[in-house]
């Protein structure tokens, strides 16, 4: 069993924010794979289904980003999951838009959602880092992540969510590098990266 956690803030006001791309990804996984309807529990919303014959619970914490760890811990305790069975989808300032990297543990780079999760369950969960780009100036970071994606960003955001959903089963079987490569190649085929781009950030 795997717990897929999408990070974001609840409410229509935040729905299209860069900070909410984790919510968008798990929504697309649920939609594309016919998961059960969302229901409220664990201080969040969950949807259950199967990927690669593995049971998967999707979780969107509704605690606001900086308290995400409460929901993750509650769900992990209920399902008796180890930290290695938890995969978190998060926005990543340090990656260019549409780039995807999967890693276990590591720093939190000022991400309040990761800080909260690490404080509740430890640091060795897997993160699917979803590049949203950096505004270039530290003082603009807060407004950048809490602003909506630009209209020109929407095609790659939609494509990214779809491609991740299509390949999400690879994450349930711990084929992280294969997942990362397939996502990159699919986005490249759709014209979001130059052919010479090997995916290195």
Image: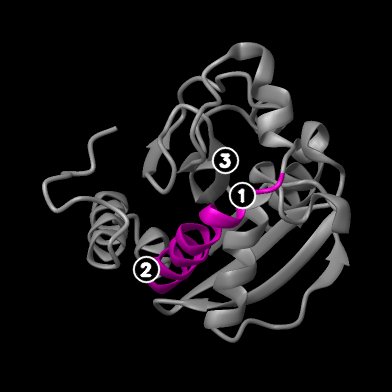
Asked if residue 7 lies left or right of residue 41, the reply is left
Residue 175 vertical position relative to residue 167 in the rendered view, above or below: above
- Which residue in the protein does label 3 denote? 91
Q: Looking at the rendering, which quadrant does residue 141 occupy?
A: top right
**Helix, strand or loop: magenta stretch:** helix
**Front of the two marks 3 and 2:** 3
The span picked out in magenta is: 148-167
Residue 35, image x and y in percent? 63, 81
Question: What is the CA distance from the residue labelled 2 to the residue labelled 1?
Answer: 26 Å
Screen quadrant of the C terminus: top left
- Which residue in the protein does label 1 denote? 150
Residue 63 vertical position relative to residue 116 in the rendered view, above or below: below
Residue 86, image x and y in percent? 55, 49
User: Viewer-proximal residue, 43 or 149?
Assistant: 149
Q: Residue furthest left?
A: 196
- Which residue in the protein does label 2 denote? 167
């Amino acid at each position: 069993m795997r717990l897929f956690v999408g990070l974001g803030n609840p409410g229509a006001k935040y729905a299209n924010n860069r900070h909410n791309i984790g919510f968008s990804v798990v929504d697309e996984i649920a939609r594309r794979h016919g998961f059960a309807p969302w229901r409220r529990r664990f201080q969040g919303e969950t949807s259950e289904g199967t990927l690669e014959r593995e049971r998967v619970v999707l979780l969107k914490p509704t605690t606001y980003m900086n308290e995400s760890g409460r929901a993750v811990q509650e769900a992990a305790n209920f399902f008796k999951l180890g930290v290695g069975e938890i995969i978190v989808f998060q926005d990543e300032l340090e990656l260019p838009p549409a780039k995807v990297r999967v890693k276990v543990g590591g720093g939190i780079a000022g991400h309040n959602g990761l800080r909260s999760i690490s404080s509740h369950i430890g640091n060795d969960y897997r993160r699917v880092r979803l590049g949203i780009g950096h505004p270039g100036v530290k003082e603009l970071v807060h407004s950048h992540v809490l602003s909506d994606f630009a209209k020109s960003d929407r095609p790659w955001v939609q494509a990214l969510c779809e491609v991740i959903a299509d390949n999400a089963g690879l994450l349930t079987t711990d084929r992280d590098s294969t997942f990362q490569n397939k996502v990159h190649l699919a986005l490249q085929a759709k014209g979001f990266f130059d052919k010479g781009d090997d995916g290195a950030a």
